Each structure stands twice: as structure tokens, then as C-alpha cells.
Amino acid sequence: MLSGVRHFLPSALSGSLCRDCLSRARCLPSRSFSWTPRQMSRWNSQECSEPLEDNPRVLITGGLGQLGVGLAQMLRKQYGRDNVILSDIKKPPSEVFSSGKPEEVIQVSISSIKITYLLCFTLSSLRATSHLCHPTRTGPFVYADVLDYKSLRELIVNNRITWMVHYSALLSAVGEANVALARKINITGLHNVLDLALENCLRLFVPSTIGAFGPSSPRDPAPDLCVQRPRTIYGVSKVHGELMGEYLHHKYGLDFRCLRYPGVISATTQPGGGTTDYAVQIFHDAISSGHHECYLRPDTRLPMMHIADCHRATVEFMQAPKSQLSLRTYNIDAMSFTPEEVAQEIRKHLPHLKVTYNPDSIRQTIADSWPVRFDDSNARRDWGWKPDYGLEELVIDMIKSIRDKRANEGLPVS
């Protein structure tokens, strides 16, 4: 082993960055590492300066939240099941992690070099793989904590990751209830991911949010470039991420990409503590009980998007050639509505829906500081963004999807 290597860019390590990065960088943030001669040889060959393969190797952090599983499914259809690794710190549900094959994980340590074999026993064969993750019917899943730099680094190296989608974060309302934890996950975790993306020449996607804007921002519409100054730890951490990614792109050539998501509406996952989550919960309540208590005022207008459009925008943005991108962070938009407007649209299909309003002071204050509409003209011009779902299409799809889901689970459907 080679030990005591503490600076990122001595001459022996010049291959660890792509040529674009090397043309700008003299040194990078210091970390204490130990590398094997094999790793040193590979980096000296400037392997990561080669063009991306047709099928990237993708790692999704925070993959069991609202967005990760659906994005993984879309990417696996295009790039193959085994090329997209879903990760999180939570135990996955059965539909995400269900192998159907007996399997055994064996770890062997030899002179501080950790070799992991996943042995999958079938009736006819014994197969060894060097992946750190378990095969599943839907695709690979692995435990990964973004605060554990060393383990995350091993995962990236051992699985030859070329793209990373960083979804790990605490959302707006949850973050305000636990600022210290939000700061740790949303900022320290982000720094780990940025450093690893730079070291391994990854194409890195980090989502931003409507929450990256504040009360002094233009609200109707909010452009890509303007005063932001959010007033939640979630928004502050997202602005920090936007600026750090842009800085590392311009200084070291990191292929950093970021989309500011509006409120994302999905039938497949439960609300996760965001200020726009009423727009998901109202559909579940309309079908299960016929009554929804909304924590925002009826006239609170916010930008929203169907999850299918969100996934498609992310994939198309990641696939866009670098030469087409005039920005590193883009707004994307689909529709804007108020709680009363979405309730009226739902009543066209479920006329019994009753909505009462009991504004929560924290979430209402957050919502009042956010834009009511996004200007996404740059995304439409640069890489051809265009949404498929408006409010009418969204309501029809959500009602059908939730009804089908409840019926499959044996739950009553109104």
C-alpha cells in the first residue's frame, strides 16, 4: 500500500482528473487517502479522460425517496438493469429489493485491500461478481450513506460509476424541524459527493428546488438568474449546491448539472415533508375518505410538475451534450395552481371531495416566499425541454394511478 498521500494533485495522480479538469487545476481540496499501485497505474493512464460509454454506469443516492425508484426504472430501460444502482440508508420495500435467488455475500480482507464477492447460487451455475450490491429483480440496490466518504468512494470505484444522481436530502418542512441534521446531510453529504465526482470524473446531477428562491426573488416568473436568498435551511443548502457545482465546473471542469424542480406530484410514493406535498396528499384523501385538510391557504399558487415529466426532464438533461448547455442550473416548469384550483379539477371526477383549510404558519410562510411560476425558457431553448402534463392530464392520471394502487392492495376505493 501507498500511504500518507494527502494532496489531490501531485504528478503521480495527474490521471485522476479528466483533461478538462487538469487544464484548470493545480490542487484540489485535501483529503487523507491510501491508494494501491493498481489504482495509481490506472489514474496515470488517464482512463477517465475517455469519452463516456454508450451505456453509463449510474449511481442514485437517496434512491428510496419520491424520485429515485422511478428514475432508476427509466434509466434501466435505456441503459440496462445492471448499469443503474439504486442506493439509500433505508431498507428497501419488497418491490424494489426482491431477488428470488438465494445469495451469499463474502468479504475477504488482504493487506488492507477489501475484496467483495457476491456469490449467487442457482440450480445450474455459480457466478462471482465484484459488485458491492445485491442483484434484484428490478435492478441492483446497495446501502450507501453519503456521510460515509470512504464507503461511498469504494462503491463508485468498485462499480465503475460514470454518472451520479444525488437525491439524498432533507426537504423544506422536515429540515426546518431539524436544522442540524439538514445541514449535515444537505451540505456535508453534498461536499462528499462533489469531491468524489471530481476525483472520478463523474457526470453529476444534483437537483435544486423552488425552495432555492426567497422573498426578495422575482416571483412571477422567477428566471434562472436572479436574487435568491432563501429562508429555509433546505433552500440555503440548495443554493450552496448550485454555486459549488458551478464553481467546480468553471475551475476544474466538473460536469455538474442541476435542475430546479417545482413541486413534484406522484402517486407511487407518500409525501416526504415538503411544502408542496398537499398536492399529493389531496389525491389520496379524495379517494380514501373524501376529505382533505390543507395546510396552505386556498389561493397559494405554486409551480408543480407530474413525476413523469420530472424524470424525463432529468434524463434528457443528463443526456444533453455539454456544448448545448449555456447554464449549469436550469428552471423547469410545467404548470402552476392553487389548492382550490386543483380541488376544483378533482371534483370533476370525484364531486364528493370536501377541502377545509387550516394554514400551518411554518409551511405557509415558506410557500409565500417562493415563486408562483418558473421561467424555463432557457431549458426549452438549450436542450428542448417541454412538459407533457398540464393540470387536467395530471388529475386524470393521479386518480387512476391511486385507484389502481389501492385496488391492488385490497384497500377501499371511493
Image (tube, rainbow, N blue to C red):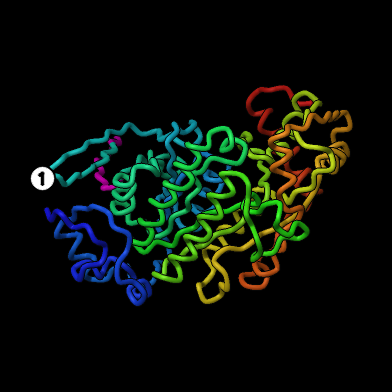
In the picture, measured across the screen, residue 278 lies left or right of residue 158, that is right
- Taking depth in this image into account, of 75 and 218 the one nearest to the observer is 218
Tally of numbered discs: 1
Q: Quadrant of residue 353?
A: top right
In the picture, measured across the screen, residue 140 lies left or right of residue 360, that is left
Residue under label 1: 111
Residue pictured at 68% horizontal, 44% vertical? 265
In the picture, measured across the screen, residue 189 lies left or right of residue 2, that is right
Q: Position of residue 14 (x, y in %)?
A: 25, 70
Q: Quadrant of residue 177?
A: top right
Q: Quadrant of the C terminus?
A: top right
101 above or below 289? below
Q: Is residue 229 visible?
A: yes
Residue pictured at 49% horizontal, 65% vertical? 246
What amino acid type should be assigned to the residue bearing mark 1? Ser
Q: Position of residue 7 (x, y in %)?
A: 24, 61
Residue 122 within the segment the image draws in magenta = yes
Decide: few, some or many residues near mark 1? Use Cα within 10 Å; few <14, some 14-19, many ≥20.
few
Residue pictured at 54% horizontal, 66% vertical? 328
Magenta residues? 121-131
106 above or below 381? above
- Taking depth in this image into account, of 310 and 53 the one nearest to the observer is 310
Residue 84 within the segment the image draws in magenta = no
- Taking depth in this image into account, of 287 and 377 the one nearest to the observer is 377
Element class at badge 1:
loop
Q: Is residue 286 visible?
A: no
Q: Position of residue 395 (x, y in %)?
A: 78, 43
Q: Quadrant of residue 30?
A: bottom left
